[in-house]
Amino acid sequence: MVNIISLNEMHLDKVCIYRIWFGNKFYIGATLNSYERILSHLSTIAAAFEGKRLGKNSITNIVNHLIANPIIETAFFELLEECENEIDLVDAEHEWLYPCKDNPNCLNQNFNVHRTINGIIVRPNGNFAIKQNNKYVLVSNI
């Protein structure tokens, strides 16, 4: 099992883009509350070690990396960018994550950034999708 330590305790409870270092590899994410997200990662990683929630996802990538590198006992949480609100997270996460899509040290599985806010799928660069006739329809520039 791995522990996650924040590099700066003042970065807890923030709306932010973050990176967690697992040895020389990392995961980038976005959250409305960094402390709660760390606890969620710990819980999900523990469940994955028990064989739950495995599949083609970032957690599987993280667990496989940890299994291959049992010397890693501590991961480090780093705040990359603090955001004002949930909508700002979308563009910020895209800006941090997309350049890492070909980086072999990035443990993220999905680089298609989006958030669902009040039933609307918000995508980078002001694009969003709304549900019409039981299908989501892309609408540009909100």
Image: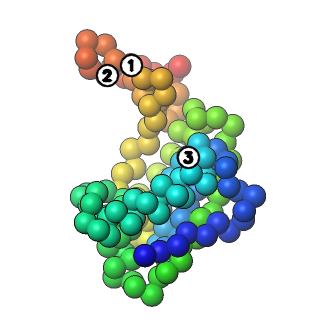
Determine if residue 55 is in view. yes
Q: x%, y% of residue 98?
A: 46, 51
At mark 2, the secondary structure is strand
Question: Circles 2 and 1: CB distance less than 8 Å?
Answer: yes
User: What's the residue type where badge 2 is placed?
Assistant: Tyr
Q: Is residue 133 above or below residue 92?
A: above
- List the residue tagged with mark 2: 136
Q: Note whether 130 is above or below 9 in the view shown.
A: above
Tell me where residue 1 appears, x and y as whole percent.
Answer: 43, 76
Q: Which residue is mark 1?
A: 130
Q: Quadrant of residue 64?
A: bottom left
Percent position of residue 47, x then y = 34, 62
| Count of residue discs | 3
- Expressed as whole percent of the image width and height from the top left, the position of residue 42 reads 47, 63
* Residue type at tag 3: Thr
Secondary structure category for the residue under label 3? strand
Q: Earlier in the sequence, mark 2 or mark 3?
A: 3
Spatial CA span between label 3 and label 1: 22 Å
Q: Residues within 10 Å of mark 3 (few under 14, many from 20)?
A: many
Q: Nearer the viewer, residue 126 or 6?
A: 6
Q: What residue is pinned by disc 3?
A: 31
**Do the residues bearing badges 3 and 1 touch, measured as CB atoms within 8 Å?**
no
User: What residue is rendered at 53% in x and 39% in y?
Assistant: 90
Q: Residue at x 70, y 56 (%)?
A: 11
Residue 95 visible within the image: no
Task: Work out which residue is located at the far right of the displayed protein and give it.
Answer: 10
- In percent of the image, x 39 and y 77: which residue is there? 66
Given the image, on which type of amino acid does mark 1 rest? Ile
- Mark 1 Cα-neighbour bin, 10 Å: few <14, some 14–19, many ≥20: some
Q: Establish if 83 lies above or below 2.
A: above
Q: Which mark is residue 37?
A: none
- Label 1 element class: strand
